[in-house]
Image (cartoon, rainbow, N blue to C red):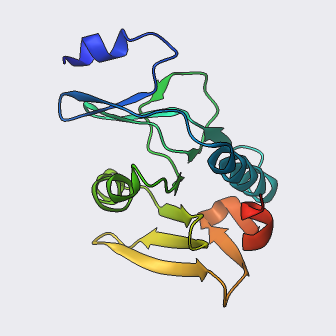
Amino acid sequence: MSLAEYLALPEGVRAEYVNGEAVVTPPATSGHNKAQRRIANAIEAGLAEAVDVRTESGWAFGELHRIPDVAVFAHKDDVVFDANVPILVVEVLSPSTASEDTVRKATEYLAAGISQYWIVDRAEPSLIVYGNNGQGWDRVAVLDADNLSATITVGAWGEVSLDLLALLRP
């Protein structure tokens, strides 16, 4: 599929564009959506008013078009696919997309220069915050059964207080 054909897909089709293919995924479960919304709300509450916290919003990096669960941009804009590099992205793992989120997307997000990548695993439960060191991802924080809360500094934009149980409650 060409990029032009992909961009002409109807609005209701949830698909990312990767290496000339439209990767279609079904809608997320309600638990996934709740976690995604709660994480976005926590980020929005902690960061500067100037940032734009988006859920299910498109991001374009060359011909790659991704739809992170949560993306934070340094500017506010009303576009389908933003060509600016997000400050941070969050992926809430689903059984069908976990390897895509943890392997391919991690590499793509690093190459694009995204500062932080958060991976949420509802099954564990856990939330891992990775920071881009220019060569790879460093673990900045791990929230799990042993560490239920943390405050994450997101560059000069502010700090996000996270409570794993509150974020992932049913």
| Residue 140 pos. (x, y %) | 53, 79
Identify the residue shown where x is 65% and y is 49%: 36
Q: Nearer the viewer, residue 35 or 8?
A: 35
- Give the position of the C terminus as an image quadrant: bottom right
Percent x, y of residue 6: 31, 17
Number of callouts: 0
Residue 126, by quadrant, is bottom right
Reply above or below: 167 against 73: below
Taking 104 as reference, is 121 above or below it? below
Between 112 and 161, the one lying in front of the other is 161
Percent across and percent down for residue 69 are 55, 45
Residue at horizontal 18 percent and vertical 35 percent from the top: 19
Q: Quadrant of residue 52?
A: top right
* Quadrant including the N terminus: top left
Using residue 61 as the reference point, say whether residue 78 is left or right of it.
Answer: right
Q: Where 169 sits versus 62, above or below?
A: below
Is 55 on the left or on the right of 160, as rendered?
A: left
From the viewer's perspective, is 28 left or right of 47? left
Q: Residue at x 28, y 54 (%)?
A: 104
Residue 136 screen position, x and y as percent: 31, 72
Residue 65 placement: quadrant: top left
Which residue is pictured at 67% across the width and 59% down the height? Answer: 157
